[in-house]
Amino acid sequence: MPPTPPPRQLHLNAFLMNAGHHDAAWRHPSTSPERVTDPAYFQELARTAERGLLDSVFLADGLALWGDVRYNALGGFEPLTLLAALATATRHIGLIATVSTTFNEPYPTARAFASLDHLSGGRAGWNIVTSGSADEARNFGRDEHLEHGLRYERAREFVDVAVKLWDSWDDDAIVLDRAAGVYADPDKVRPIDHRGTHFRVRGPLNVPRSPQGRPLLVQAGSSEDGKEFAARHAEAVFTAQQTLSGARAFAADLRARLARYGRAQDAVRILPGICPVIGSTEAEARALERELTELQVPEYGLAQLSGMLGTDLTGLPLDGPLPDLPDERDINGNRSRFALVADLGRREGLTLRELIARLGGGRGHRVVAGTPEQIADELQEWFTRGAADGFNIMPPHLPRGLDHFVDQVVPVLQARGLFRTEYAGHTLREHYGLARPAARAHEPLAV
Amino acid sequence: MPPTPPPRQLHLNAFLMNAGHHDAAWRHPSTSPERVTDPAYFQELARTAERGLLDSVFLADGLALWGDVRYNALGGFEPLTLLAALATATRHIGLIATVSTTFNEPYPTARAFASLDHLSGGRAGWNIVTSGSADEARNFGRDEHLEHGLRYERAREFVDVAVKLWDSWDDDAIVLDRAAGVYADPDKVRPIDHRGTHFRVRGPLNVPRSPQGRPLLVQAGSSEDGKEFAARHAEAVFTAQQTLSGARAFAADLRARLARYGRAQDAVRILPGICPVIGSTEAEARALERELTELQVPEYGLAQLSGMLGTDLTGLPLDGPLPDLPDERDINGNRSRFALVADLGRREGLTLRELIARLGGGRGHRVVAGTPEQIADELQEWFTRGAADGFNIMPPHLPRGLDHFVDQVVPVLQARGLFRTEYAGHTLREHYGLARPAARAHEPLAV
């Protein structure tokens, strides 16, 4: 008889952000906003996530000051350097950094991720973003942001070049023959000679092939362009989903696109974000949710909402309805987030104040308040009904929200056989159950 | 009576490179070339340097594969990520990363250094280079390298922008008033609105002001353009100097340029590189030097020499003289290194083989073989005679060459009162005796 395959289990990332994901987290008495530029703070959080056997620590990023600094705590660590520092403070957990393809070049980006993969013994992941704001463009010599479709065109070629660079060294290129004076076999280190529309890159990379071969490729946009990009390149997809039916439709849509690129149905892990507000009773969880909502600064919420909706809401009555909104096709920022927020507001007929409260915990990601068992029930339902392979866990307040998830929710999931009880592998790819890609020579292609 | 000023003391950096600075180091039986992609190897080296109370660990860098991979060990860690990992493994020592102004953008570069400065508690330094090779240009969409003068023009504006970005947050911008809901004072976080020839950057930076205010600014080119750039921006200058008289002339020239930029004579630390080949007797040191020379692969040396001289030397007899060389003004790579090597070969009438042997240890930096006392004598003479404020220590082989320097040379320098016996400060600027710059609003300037 063939061996029984291991049961399918959840993949869980700790999505870390400053004092927590709730936009008022820094005002909560349990948080430490004075520590958001202290590396020890993030080391402690990463060790907590590792104690919970989570797959990875994930850091979002942008290349401009987000929102109004008056109202929200900002650490601002650059993700690759912070994760390099966390690599030496942890042993098992994956380390996923967000880096933009719009405002970087493929050679140093591929190199930095190869470096992080070596530094961490094969735990690096790259969350590939095309960046969403004109504020970022204005830090790079442009008045307006590059058009949405063009950003994704550049992103596709950017990742193609990065893959070629990671594959420019064979695994066995290093010979290390001291007696003969031969360090590496030059036939196993190849120029890539890429000549495309956006990039010309000769290669090879100036770092030997890293433990995972390539970092894990992650993608987080859910627009049409984003889904097509994910189907082509992504091994894990982060997504914001408010409803089970919406998440199932998203997952089915994404999986259906994989075949077009010759990829298997299970080549991608789909991981919605979720902000778990945990209490020892449901009433306690609801009280925490209310407490955080009451700490929100409405001006900040309105400014954030204006950004997500591409519409200036300043001066509108907080207890009034959403105004008319632009068409999704006219949004040049984060297009899928626009659609999600507009839909949420309209579907439930929310006032601006109610919408700000709903978005406070997860900026569009789903917020679930309840006991550890209730949170586990939610995760299990989405997981078993084809809406998710796992989740990006977005604690509303830190460190407490992560402590509670690790100490209270993870054991419930383990008891149900839904989550690992020890790390079985060493690399992030192994945690995700994904194969290590083989290095290969790439044909020079016209792109 | 006014207090006696502390005696002037040496500043010493550990310049780390793969298996060591000698191009045959990886073939020496004491080295560990199989560990050059192992972060623990660099952590051990950094801890050794810290045990020796050195000012900093310094990493060179380039954005292309250097030389022929057949003949030399290559780690290839990206410096900012490696130093971030070393930041958490050390407590005192400075961390200086090389980053090019030709192939990067000011916003993410300023941000990454601010991040490293936070991660290390104020120990970050930036070795600013304009990059020297066409191989690097070919990884960034160009066939040829940007012209030397234009590279420095871009570098000047790049650093101006970075300084404005670091100064875009006041030290006391973060208010952290939980009750009032005010995290930061928006009047103390300023856009920079830079509009220059090469860059338009709006700012502010998306990370609060770091412990040192700005990272220490280091520069390593010694051409005319390089010296002028150093006089304007640099707080430490790395330089390759073969002779005491040459080094004194360089130091005097550089100091004379400082006044032009309103800077004091002691605003810069001048640090020549030196490769110390240490033996318990002079004969033992000479034997080690010979041993390393005998391990050199002549083809590799000839290729390296061809690169430094901008001249293809392939096929020339190793025991013959240098051929005619181009004029320095026609060199578009590392111009000062060309001049140094050409001068060394001509002045001493060296054959190609002899020149390759002389360059093996330090690629143009001075090599000194002797006992710990003899090495200390050399450092002391240069230091007291106005040729150096300290040195970049380039061990020929690692880890042994660094161990011997720390355990045998440092105590001699300490006994002579020439080097610290404990870290007096916490930041790299404090180790170097340099002030922390104040944040200030910069006038928008036409550049």
Image (tube, coloured by chain):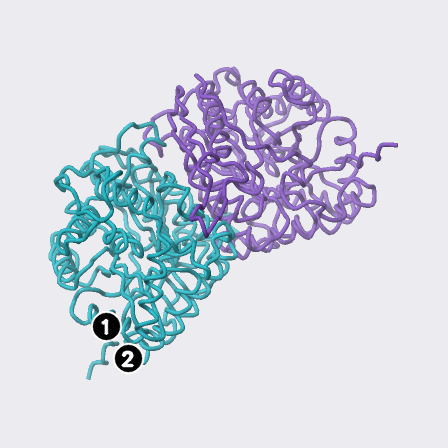
Chain colours: A cyan, B purple
Which chain does the numbered disc 1 sit on? A
* One can see residue B67 in this view: no
Would you place residue A374 above or below residue A340 in this image?
below
Amino acid identity at mark 1: Gln
Q: Quadrant of residue B12?
A: top right
* The N terminus of chain A - image quarter: bottom left
Q: Earlier in the sequence, mark 1 or mark 2?
A: 1
Q: Which residue is mark 2?
A: A416
Q: Which residue is mark 1?
A: A380
Q: Callout 2: few (<14), some (14-19), or many (20+) C-alpha neighbours within 10 Å?
A: few
Q: Residue B226, position in %: x, y?
A: 55, 23
Q: Quadrant of residue B427?
A: top right
Q: Residue B337, position in %: x, y?
A: 56, 26
Residue shown at 30%/64% (left/top)?
A: A432
Query: Looking at this rendering, what residue extends furthest in the right direction?
Result: B1
Q: Is residue A440 left or right of residue A14?
A: left
Would you place residue A244 above or below residue A257 in this image?
below
Contact check, label 1 and label 2, Cβ < 8 Å:
yes
In front here: B98 or B145?
Answer: B98
